[in-house]
Image (cartoon, rainbow, N blue to C red):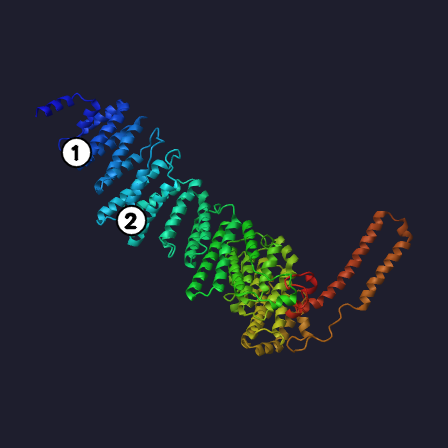
Amino acid sequence: MATSHICSCFGNFGPRYKRLVDNIFPADARSGLVKANMDKLIFYALSSPEKLDRIGTYLARKLTRFVDRKRYDFVRISMEALDLLLMACHAPSLNLFVESFLRMVQKLLESPEAELQVLGTSSFVKFANIEEDTPSYHRRYDFFVSKFSAMCWNDNENQKHRQQIRTSGLRGLQGVVRKTVSDDLQVNLWDNTHISKIVPSLLFILEESEKSFNEFQSDDDPAHIAEACLRELMSRASFGNIKSVINPVLNHLNSSELWVPNEFALKVFKIIMFSVQNQYNYVVIQMLLSYLDASSKESAKKKAGVVSVLAECVGLATGSSIGPAVLEVFNTLLRHLRYSVDARFNSSGHGCKLEDEMDFEQSIVHTIGAFAALLPDFQKTDVMLFIMDKFPHRNTNQHTSDRRSLRFTESDVELQKMLLHSLRQVSVSYNPTSLSAVFSPSFMDAIFHAAIVENPEVRQLALEVIFALIDRHNNSKNLGLNGMLKDGKEIQLNVEKCPKQDLMFFQKYHDQIIWYLYESASMRTNNVSNILAIYVTMATISTEMSEMEVISQLVPLVFGFQNMAMKEESKISTACRCALHAVVAAFLILAAQLLRLETLSDYAEEVYEMFKKAGCDYKGIRVAYEHQELSGVLARTSSPESIVSSVSNELDGQPSSGGTRPSTPMEHITFQILKGIISDRQHVNGTNIESPKFAESSFNEIADIASYQLQEFNSKLDNVLEAALIPLTTSALSISTVSISSVPGDDTFELKFPQEYIY
């Protein structure tokens, strides 16, 4: 007893900071912290900041003793005192006090008691929210990262304790992120040893929340905290640190097999894309592409899940964040598309595997369209040309006869289809300013050549791409089966004045375009969809340009279709013959509407009604053409201004036998006309040399005379050439596909002399 009195007596003579620390603890722990004495301790610490280190050390020693003795009420009082000291003191010597504070927090976290772990985490979070004047660059957080991450994986049988510990672990990780990630000179949180523990812990909490189907989340819900922590982590990541976060995400999704189904992966990457800085979005996309390459030998389902996530990320990215290697992105996707098509036809897999490969290919096509939507128009042109470079072609070194004996493999044909589907996805977001900007010579040759390959579906897709690129006013949907072809009447169209450069483009390539369209229409394997695609292409060209010069050059092509449909030797189906007649009627109605020719419109509508009465019967159509009423309609519409004047004259001079021509064509250029031109020219040359007036005239007078004579000669020559062109116009496209394609050594898609071979 005496000894205790002696110790108590000498205790009053101890250091002042110890007495102040001892005085904050009440005799009964239920009374809580002694506020008055705590204020004295804070005042002393502010007045003598050099004592903070000793205060912290002494408090840590007392806390350790309380923990060992399981006096948890006094533990809470000690932590409350530490928190108040931290909030009040910002002196440079605070770093020494923090070391003692972190040792006390570590002591609590090491305790098996859930209550103490929660208490220690709460104190650490308060400390993490304090902005230190002089941060410590030698402080280590390795233990806290490991401990807080482990708390996120806690599997305590008591659900309440389990949720408390997991929530505390998440808040602790959030505190570590806030404390360290803002200053690169502090502990490197982005190091693989740390980030590989943090990110999987956050994803595990999010995954557990998905399994529990919690629709309503509070601020204290673990999933809500985990998402907030992941967002904060990504928002603070610099360019060099983004990969450090994405790699653990990919590894976790792979190890947990969360790509199939990929709903959780979609959710995670949406969080990442919304949180990362906009200029770094393309880093995430590139990492997904690299992961797709690394997973090339995985199942098609998994790769489809990765590509779906990639497409979603592309849709969320900004327009400038696709990255510098644009073609490399498309090269990667097209390479996987090729591998998938080959695997589908070269493997002897079950039906479900084939369906998985098809789903994977559709995902790639959708992703290509999503990528292209981010690009400016000039880059879309490069992308489309790049895609067509991957289009399978025959070996051009082979002779024509040899090449016809060759056939594309099934995988090549399927790849052609998928590439054209990809092009169609690109064309959806492409709105070119001019046709010459999108149809470069190389791209035009490639895409129009695809319109005359053997497979009808490939031809149809190629034509759909063509008219989608031409159609800048969305008229194509009103020109098809649900528009003009349905009712045979005028429809509402969005027509603007044709730009001069588009008109020049058509003047340059119209022979080539017409040849390809006719060649495509004469294919034996055509179906009604192919004929419809050809019509929509022609109609789109007409509506986009809406010029007499353009439409008048397409009308002979339409009459060529008519002749093809009427000939018995044409090896096309009856359905295609009916479709060709429908194309003739629909195009004439469209031409009449665009050129505002009422007589032509009346004529076309009457013909349409005749076809409608005859039905889809080839004989009925022939009867309609032999009907006397047709001659009357043509007679009423024959005028110099009518676009069909030359056609009506030819039809009047022909017998009524289904499109056959007279055996002796009418002579438009006589011998007398040619003789007159040549004799006049010789006479002019002779008189100019011998005339005295010519010898005495000045140079300017001689030049004027020569210019006038040259104009007169050219005028006569033009009249002759105009007469020579009349048979070409009235008998447009009368030759068959076989005769066009039968020239040995010439490719069907190469036009060396289009002006001579087009008709």
Question: In the rendered image, which quarter is residue 468 located in?
Answer: bottom right
Front residue of this view, candidates 286 and 195: 195
Q: Name the residue under label 1.
A: 32
For image coordinates 30% across by 28% down, the residue present is: 96
Residue 555 placement (x, y as % from top left): 63, 65
Compute the Cα span from label 2 to label 1.
34 Å
Mark with earlier residue (2, 1)? 1
Residue 686 placement (x, y as % from top left): 88, 57
Locate the C terminus by quadrant: bottom right
Task: Check contact, mark 2 vs mark 1: CB within 8 A.
Answer: no
Element carrying mark 1: loop
Mark toward the viewer: 2 or 1? 1
Amino acid type at mark 2: Gln
Locate the N terminus by quadrant: top left
Amino acid type at mark 1: Gly
Front residue of this view, candidates 593 and 757: 757
